[in-house]
Image (spheres, rainbow, N blue to C red):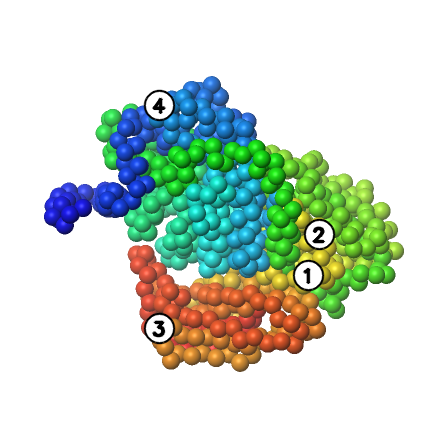
Amino acid sequence: MTLFYRLALGAVLLLILNQCTVQDKILQQTADKVADKVMLDVTDQKVEALLAQMTLEEKVGQMNQYNGFWEFTGPAPEDGDAKVKYDHLKTGRVGSVLNVRGAASVRELQELVVEESRLGIPLIFGSDVIHGYKTLSPIPLAEAASWDLKAIEKSARVAAIEASAVGINWTFAPMVDISRDARWGRVMEGAGEDTYLGSKIGVARIKGFQGDDLSADNTILACLKHFAGYGFAEAGKDYNTVDVGTSTLYNVILPPFKAGVENGVRTVMNSFNVLNGIPATGDAFLQREILKGKWGFDGFVISDWGSGKEMIDHGFAKDLKDVAVLATNGGSDMDMESTANVNHLQEAVEAGLVKESYVDDAVRRILRTKYELGLFDDPYKYCSPEKEATLLYHEDHQAAALDMAKRSIVLLKNDNQLLPLNKQQQKIAVIGALADDKSSPLGGWRIGSDDGTAVSLLEGLAKYTDQISYAKGADVVLENPEFIKELKINETDKSGFAEAVALAAKSDIVLMALGEVGFHSGEGRSRTKLGLPGVQQELLEAVHNVNPNIVLVLSNGRPLTIPWAAENVPAIVETWQLGSQSGNAIAQVLFGDYNPSGKLPMTFPRSVGQIPIYYNPYNTGRPGPIDLVFWAHYGDESNTPLYPFGYGLSYTTFEYSNLQIDTTDAATIKVSATVTNTGSVAGEEVAQLYIRDMVGSVVRPIKELKGFEKFELAAGASKTVTFSLGDQELGFYDNTGNFIVEPGDFQVMIGGSSDAGLTGAFTR
Ligand code: NOJ
């Protein structure tokens, strides 16, 4: 573009912009950027050329996503007639489908579109590949407990390799919703309660899915979700209202999304919830002003399943046409399963309710992504029967899943070094239905994987010793759980107790495998009680009566409230749901072949009444304690958690010493400490750095994680960890969304948990 042309264009734009709303301006800026790129970017040139050929009907077709015809991950679609969809595929009225998988099935649909529709624009195939496709890694919350970004990236890479081998080129992951509420079943899908850790993990996952080259045939689009606030559903009830303050929105909820955008994520999914009374799918503030405007996101936004249509239930839209208008004007580019765009957007544009430039902007984003994937060069690049036959459940993937699983385990308690187990002599009783369960370790979101493919705890233990005797004790659920159905918990059947108690009585040590089945947590799986489900607590106590030498092997997709166990059981191992290699990973930890190194990514409450409980609240005006009742506390419960964020033990011990704060360079303050392995075996530690900004124009939390490092130390060895604190770590967002850095006093803490460490202070 010549300088003269630019100036002239700029003047015209300025004139137009003066008349426009903020949203229009942002759209104009985006279009301007695209216009600029036309001179430079071959892909954009191709996009423009294709866009110019498209009818309005074809454009809105790109903004439509249908579910596959045989499986669904939301309420069954009313408009689910396969014939309609086939017809729409052939006429270019579909841009993407979800829940279609398998090289042959994907090819069949792709052929229909590419061969028969007028312009042959290939489909993108989306799926919830959340923690693997066939080979499953631990659930995301468990992976987060590893604090191991390399292993997490690798896990996402493996997921992408397997998914892309069955035709999938888009995963609806990572979920970067921060949540402080263990009642919300979807905490299993995220990285826990902390925005800093969550941002790092989100970025690692994006890198793993998208790789360095999106056009390769084994990398897939990542999707940040759910934009925004979904993790703050009131009372932990899924899909519920969200009502958060501005400071929490800017400082807690949005940063992981921003980090993902800065690191090249290509798609973002909006969410079911309202924020300030506006459903996220129709929220121009979130999607146009912040995401596409301030952050310059140039990928596309997909709605959540039917979240467009749900704006009618929210009382925001009056009918589906209104949905198409509000969603598109709000910045949602592609409609998952509402059928609003495909059936009403054209009409709305023609009636002047939506500007065609908004539609063009959305379609540009979608087409560009398709070019980036290389779909126009080869629409069948992900449909390789050979890869499908050789890559699924591949041994290298199993090895990566095992490695990830070991790293995800958190040792919560280990009195008198009950663990690791002795590989010889001990008579070991294993009790609990979960020990013999080959599906529950796969957790929720296992759409591609096959039930019964996890290594069970019993199988893992059998590789170490033949001194194992097993008694189920009690079922956790009455029926085999199904992904889409309510669970039926066993609240009454204790007929197996006697056998379990008898076995425990004659054993040296008892491993009790208790907790949640795989579908206890996940979407739509909110709970008000977070103790061991069903009769398991009673079973634990009955066994404890005859043999207190118990290792509680917990499996769960969320923090549980287990105060009795924490008080009475000498050893507790948090194993979450560890995926395909679960039993092997747990056995390696129990027998000491892997020294546990995980740290909790989410606080474990003592009781549900403490929720939301998290490590970084504000101090309040009455932090106490004082002798009178007038301070922020409960009359019947401690303020402290059962196990705090960042907490986790090892078979060795680590000591922190020599905290140093170097303020020579005010732009980059260095905080360091020496960590020494003071035990007798090698182990890995996660050193964590927390800060507190003592006085702010907006109140700051009592603690904020601002750095961590995971490393291994031989017995007796020491290491100095050094963290840098600059503007990015010391600043925060004010209530208008501006990032500000204020001078003042700061406290720092370095330690192995959020509740303990060396403390110091500096002024900056
Ligand atoms: C609804 C969920 O909220 C979302 O995370 C998921 O990706 C879609 N369904 C598609 O299955």
Q: Which callout, 3 or 1, points to the residue nearer the camera?
A: 1
Q: Residues within 10 Å of mark 3 (few under 14, many from 20)?
A: few
Which sits earlier in the primary sequence, circle 1 or circle 4? 4
Tell me where residue 125 appears, x and y as whole percent: 47, 34
Give the amino acid type for the residue marked by disc 4 in the picture: Arg
Tell me where residue 396 appears, x and y as whole percent: 62, 48
Which sits earlier in the primary sequence, circle 3 or circle 2? 2
Q: Is residue 705 left or right of residue 23?
A: right
Q: Residues within 10 Å of mark 1 (few under 14, many from 20)?
A: many
Give the amino acid type for the residue marked by disc 3 in the picture: Ala
Tell me where residue 100 appears, x and y as whole percent: 52, 31
Residue drawn at the location 38% of the way across and 69% of the way down: 726
Marks 3/4: CA–CA distance: 58 Å
Q: Nearer the viewer, residue 90 or 196?
A: 90
User: Dot 2: what SS?
Assistant: helix
Tell me where residue 68 appears, x and y as whole percent: 50, 29
Question: Circle 3 sits on which residue?
Answer: 667
Q: Establish whether ligand 1 lies closer than 8 Å to the Cβ of label 4.
A: no
User: Dot 4: what SS?
Assistant: loop
Residue drawn at the location 28% of the way across and 28% of the way down: 53
Give the amino acid type for the residue marked by disc 2 in the picture: Asn
Residue 719 higher or lower than 521, as above or below:
below
Quarter of the image with the C terminus in it: bottom left
Q: Which callout, 3 or 4, points to the residue nearer the camera?
A: 4
Numbered mark located on residue 594 in the image: 1
Marks 2/4: CA–CA distance: 53 Å
Q: Residues within 10 Å of mark 2 (few under 14, many from 20)?
A: many
Marks 3/2: CA–CA distance: 47 Å
Q: Tell me whether the residue at label 3 lies in contact with that at label 4, contact meaning CB atoms closer than 8 angstroms.
A: no
Marks 1/4: CA–CA distance: 58 Å
Question: Circle 4 sits on which residue?
Answer: 118
Q: Nearer the viewer, residue 47 or 632?
A: 47
